[in-house]
Image: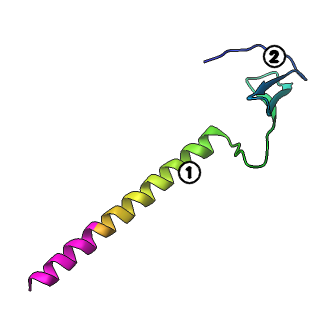
Amino acid sequence: MLVLSRKPNESIIIDGHIKVRVLRVDSGNAVRLGVEAPMDIRVMRKEIYDEIMASNQAAAGSVGMARKRAKKKKDLATRN
Protein backbone atom coordinates (compact mmCIF):
# COMPACT_ATOMS: atom_id res chain seq x y z
CA MET A 1 0.00 0.00 0.00
CA LEU A 2 1.27 3.42 -0.93
CA VAL A 3 0.75 5.95 1.88
CA LEU A 4 0.80 9.64 0.98
CA SER A 5 0.39 12.87 2.93
CA ARG A 6 -1.73 15.52 1.26
CA LYS A 7 -3.10 18.85 2.43
CA PRO A 8 -6.47 20.36 1.45
CA ASN A 9 -6.61 21.19 -2.27
CA GLU A 10 -3.68 18.88 -3.04
CA SER A 11 -4.21 15.92 -5.36
CA ILE A 12 -2.85 12.62 -6.53
CA ILE A 13 -3.16 11.19 -10.04
CA ILE A 14 -3.81 7.48 -10.62
CA ASP A 15 -2.92 5.88 -13.94
CA GLY A 16 -2.71 9.26 -15.62
CA HIS A 17 -6.45 9.87 -15.75
CA ILE A 18 -7.96 9.51 -12.25
CA LYS A 19 -7.55 12.52 -9.97
CA VAL A 20 -8.16 12.31 -6.21
CA ARG A 21 -8.18 15.64 -4.39
CA VAL A 22 -8.35 16.37 -0.67
CA LEU A 23 -11.24 18.82 -0.38
CA ARG A 24 -11.42 19.21 3.37
CA VAL A 25 -10.12 17.72 6.61
CA ASP A 26 -12.68 17.94 9.41
CA SER A 27 -11.75 18.34 13.06
CA GLY A 28 -12.80 14.72 13.70
CA ASN A 29 -11.67 11.70 11.70
CA ALA A 30 -13.38 12.67 8.44
CA VAL A 31 -11.56 13.58 5.25
CA ARG A 32 -13.57 14.86 2.29
CA LEU A 33 -12.20 13.61 -1.04
CA GLY A 34 -13.11 14.51 -4.59
CA VAL A 35 -12.59 11.97 -7.38
CA GLU A 36 -12.43 12.87 -11.07
CA ALA A 37 -12.46 9.80 -13.30
CA PRO A 38 -13.61 8.88 -16.81
CA MET A 39 -17.28 7.88 -17.02
CA ASP A 40 -16.37 4.26 -17.80
CA ILE A 41 -14.57 3.92 -14.42
CA ARG A 42 -16.94 3.11 -11.56
CA VAL A 43 -16.07 4.91 -8.35
CA MET A 44 -17.89 3.95 -5.16
CA ARG A 45 -17.39 3.71 -1.43
CA LYS A 46 -15.94 0.37 -0.34
CA GLU A 47 -18.91 -0.51 1.87
CA ILE A 48 -21.25 -0.10 -1.12
CA TYR A 49 -18.93 -2.20 -3.29
CA ASP A 50 -18.86 -4.91 -0.59
CA GLU A 51 -22.69 -4.94 -0.43
CA ILE A 52 -22.94 -5.30 -4.21
CA MET A 53 -20.42 -8.16 -4.21
CA ALA A 54 -22.24 -9.97 -1.38
CA SER A 55 -25.57 -9.52 -3.16
CA ASN A 56 -24.11 -10.85 -6.43
CA GLN A 57 -22.62 -13.87 -4.68
CA ALA A 58 -25.92 -14.60 -2.92
CA ALA A 59 -27.79 -14.32 -6.22
CA ALA A 60 -25.27 -16.59 -7.96
CA GLY A 61 -25.67 -19.10 -5.14
CA SER A 62 -29.46 -18.96 -5.46
CA VAL A 63 -29.24 -19.57 -9.19
CA GLY A 64 -26.81 -22.43 -8.62
CA MET A 65 -29.10 -24.06 -6.05
CA ALA A 66 -32.14 -23.61 -8.31
CA ARG A 67 -30.26 -25.25 -11.19
CA LYS A 68 -29.26 -28.18 -8.96
CA ARG A 69 -32.88 -28.66 -7.80
CA ALA A 70 -34.15 -28.47 -11.40
CA LYS A 71 -31.56 -31.00 -12.56
CA LYS A 72 -32.40 -33.34 -9.71
CA LYS A 73 -36.13 -33.02 -10.47
CA LYS A 74 -35.47 -33.68 -14.17
CA ASP A 75 -33.31 -36.72 -13.34
CA LEU A 76 -36.06 -38.14 -11.11
CA ALA A 77 -38.69 -37.54 -13.81
CA THR A 78 -36.63 -39.31 -16.50
CA ARG A 79 -36.13 -42.34 -14.22
CA ASN A 80 -39.89 -42.83 -13.81
Quadrant of the image for the N terminus?
top right
Left or right: 16 in relation to 8: left
Quadrant of the image for the C terminus?
bottom left
Question: Which residue has dot 2 on it?
Answer: 6
Left or right: 43 in relation to 76: right
Crowd class of label 1 (few under 14; some 14 to 19; many from 20; radius 10 Å): few
Q: Which secondary structure is most common in the magenta stretch?
A: helix
What element does badge 1 sit on? helix
Spot occupied by residue 24 in the image (x, y as percentages of width and height): 86, 26
Q: Which amino acid does label 1 sit on?
A: Ile
69 over 55 or under it: above or below: below
Label 2 to label 1: alpha-carbon separation: 30 Å
Q: What residue type is labelled 2?
A: Arg
Boundaries of the magenta span: 68-80
Residues at badges 2 and 1 in contact (C-beta under 8 Å)?
A: no
Q: Does the magenta stretch include residue 79?
A: yes
Spot occupied by residue 78 in the image (x, y as percentages of width and height): 14, 83
What element does badge 2 sit on? loop
> Who comes first in sequence, dot 2 or dot 1?
2
**What residue is at 48 percent from the left and 49 percent from the top?**
54
Q: Does the magenta stretch include residue 33?
A: no
Disc ID at residue 3: none
Question: Which residue has dot 1 on it?
Answer: 52
4 over 80 or under it: above or below: above
**In the image, farthest residue toward the left:** 80
8 over 64 or under it: above or below: above
